Image (spheres, rainbow, N blue to C red):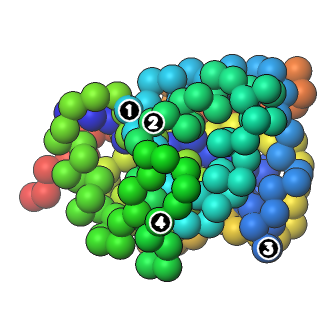
Amino acid sequence: MRKVLTDHLRSLDGYFGGPNGEIDWIGFDEESMEGSRKIVGAAGSIVMGRRTFELMAQYWPSQAARDQEPYIAEHMTELPRIVFSRTLDSSTWKHTEFVSRPVAEMIREAKQGTGGSILILGSSTILLPLWKEHLVDEVNVRIQPIVVGKGRPLFSDPEVRQPLALQESRMFHSGVTALRYEIPPQPAPA
């Protein structure tokens, strides 16, 4: 069975994007990039929503990305990508499949397959149904040393409560704090 992992960059006050989705406040230092390399390197596929896909598609297939971060650029380009969208259905970025069916249904099926982990990038709208159905196995968060004040929250549903088990924490020289949590098994319904 494949594991579902998430990788998120967020502000101290819980936002992963500004009010208009801007991420200009996110810092990328070498220690943080090493964490990204490890997570992306273990992935067998990448899952994201339309907005995250549009941001990623502007950068990762470019020569600038290959020059600056060749390992991640190669993986981001060569791994199969599943993009949940009701408006997009094609892209020139190879290995991209657009899906409009329910997120939890698709991920539940993908977990039954073989291969590397299923990596969820960004995409709080994709994360919510996966939380509700307890389909996430590991959460990776890098907290940026900034308070943004307002924006797009990573976890937007107050009805979803999920205990986490801290497996690793690191403080980088830049002030970024990296946390890795596993999701404890859910008790069987009574």
Query: In which quadrant is the N terminus drawn?
Result: top left
Name the residue tied to disc 1.
44
Q: Mark number for residue 79?
A: 2
Tell whether label 4 touches label 3 (CB within 8 Å).
no
Q: Mark number for residue 90?
A: 4
Per the model, the C-alpha gap separating discs 3 and 2 is 30 Å
Q: Nearer the viewer, residue 44 or 163?
A: 44
Q: Identity of the amino acid at label 1?
A: Gly
Per the model, the C-alpha gap separating discs 1 and 3 is 32 Å
Mark earlier in primary sequence (4, 1): 1
**Under tag 4, what secondary structure?**
loop
Q: Is residue 129 visible?
A: yes
Q: Position of residue 105 (x, y in %)?
A: 23, 63
For the point 55% across and 51% down, which residue is it?
A: 93
Per the model, the C-alpha gap separating discs 4 and 1 is 21 Å
**Under tag 2, what secondary structure?**
loop
Residue 185 drawn above or below residue 115: below
Mark earlier in primary sequence (3, 4): 3
Name the residue tied to disc 3.
19
For the point 88% across and 51% down, which residue is it?
A: 25
